[in-house]
Image (cartoon, grey):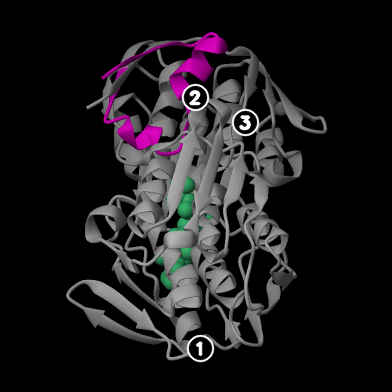
Amino acid sequence: MAIFRIEGPVTLNGRVRISGAKNSILPIIAASLLAEGESVFEEVPHLKDVEIMCELVESLGAKVKFSPKESRLTVDPANVENILAPYELVNKLRASFLVMGPLLAKKGQAKISLPGGCAIGSRPVDLHLKGFVAMGASIIYNHGYIEARVNRRLKGSKIYLDFPSVGATENIMMAATLAKGQTIIENAAIEPEVVDLSTYLVSMGADIRGAGTDTIKINGTDKLKGSTHTIIPDRIEAGTFMVAAAITGGDVIIENVVPSHLKPVSAKLREANIEIAEELTSIHIKAGKKIKSLDIKTHPYPGFPTDMQAQMTSLMAKATGTSMIVETIFENRFMHVNELKRMGARIKIDGRSAIIEGAMKLMGTQVKATDLRAGAALIIAALAAEGTSEIIDVEHVDRGYVSIDQKLRQLGAKIERFD
Ligand code: EPZ
């Protein structure tokens, strides 16, 4: 069990460089299975989740080479024969389910352990399966596994997503690239990571139009070639550092970002009286002394991202006045609240809403990371709290943040890791 020990309060100043996006590289590794040859990826973040996804595609038969120092990953799917994604891997990483579309398209079958729920919610995959069935696959549930198979070849279909699910949009889009005929995905997710996946697929020879809008058209082709692709910066890592700068009254330049991907976060931070200047590939945050309270509701992109909700809850504990945060995407994403209350935050949960009484003095203490973004929220709170905080189970944080302690130390934080 790894622990972060953090002394507060500090003021963060300086520059930090953001790594490649976790939620972009994970579907893209799955997509690399569609190719006839090797793909090379740059700006790949060295994260636990990336290691597990590599382990999965290797278990399917792909050849994987990851050089974390160069942030480069190569995947050669030539020998992929196995079509089973086992429980022990899927249980560690729900995103493993994203290999179903590529395996169905390339091999005509897939057997994947039904991804369990996780801390933040039940996380069903019904929309993914609805898409595959519409494209001619038959699905059977067998002892906790989902077995999908198609007789000859997936066929293009028109699919309306009841909810703009990121994963379902990505899984169906990948399957459609090798289907016979045209697939139209309506009410598709428009997150930047969906667009990044589409960019990679098109570079492999896929015929995709409309990624980034709510209607994506894919004309199936017979085969796709390996390609090279540079992963977009991680907008959630960037947003996390923006909030850390804001809560500590700091002055930080965040490099290697796409400012337009951060619009919903920048807009909210400006509303909270934080100064934000956007350059071409960087954002400059200058926090005022006073943080204004906010009302926030999470929504699919370009609404306020659910992956930034926990971090903003920490910030609002220091704002003047009462804030309201509504989590509309996941049913159980307030586990950071009890931990923040141990630090002195005054927060009341009412269903999907958190009412936060601001301007509370946060006190350092022992707290526990329950999931990836809750862990990030506790780090943010600890930076502004009086005294020493110890955050346990920070393995959760390792899943989505490359060397977060090192990056924070560069900005003046007093943070040590103990494994
Ligand atoms: C992706 O998860 C991200 N993960 C999540 O990031 C992110 O929170 C989420 O999108 C929303 O932006 C990756 O990209 C690997 P969804 P995903 O399908 O694809 C319901 C992080 O912290 N739903 O858009 O699983 C679902 O229950 C992680 O980096 C169905 O009902 O998200 C949820 O309520 C956490 N049926 C909502 O849609 C389905 O078939 C959003 O899910 C699929 C989803």
Q: Residue at x 74, y 29 (%)?
A: 282
Image position, residue 148 (x, y; %): 36, 80
The secondary structure type at the circle numbered 2 is loop
| Location of residue 291 (image quadrant) | top right
Disc 1 or disc 3, which is closer to the eye?
Answer: 1
Tell me the number on the disc at residue 359. 2
Circle 1: residue type: Ala
Decide if residue 156 is on the left or right side of residue 69.
right
What residue is shown with label 3?
Answer: 292
Tell me the crowding category of disc 3: few under 14, some 14 to 19, or many 20 or more residues within 10 angstroms, Cα based.
many
The image shows residue 376 at horizontal and vertical percentages of: 43, 32
Q: Which residue bears the numbered disc 1?
A: 134
Tag 3, which secondary structure? Answer: loop
Q: Residue at x 58, y 84 (%)?
A: 159
Q: CA distance from mark 3 to mark 2?
A: 10 Å
Q: Nearer the viewer, residue 39 or 330?
A: 39
Residue 192: in sight, yes or no? yes
Distance from the alpha carbon under mark 1 to that under mark 2: 52 Å
What is the magenta range?
A: 390-419
In the structure shown, which secondary structural element does the residue marked by tag 1 occupy?
helix
Looking at marks 1 and 2 on the same chain, the residue that comes earlier in the sequence is marked by 1
Q: Residue furthest left?
A: 143
In this orientation, does residue 329 appear? no
- Is the N terminus in the top left, top right, bottom left or bottom right quadrant? top left
Residue pictured at 51% horizontal, 68% vertical: 171
Q: How many other residues sit within 10 Å of disc 2, few (<14), some (14-19) or many (≥20)?
A: many
Q: Considering the image in quadrants, where does the C terminus appear?
A: top left
Amino acid bearing label 2: Ala
The reply to whether dot 1 and dot 2 touch (C-beta < 8 Å) is: no
**x then y, percent, for residue 244:** 54, 24
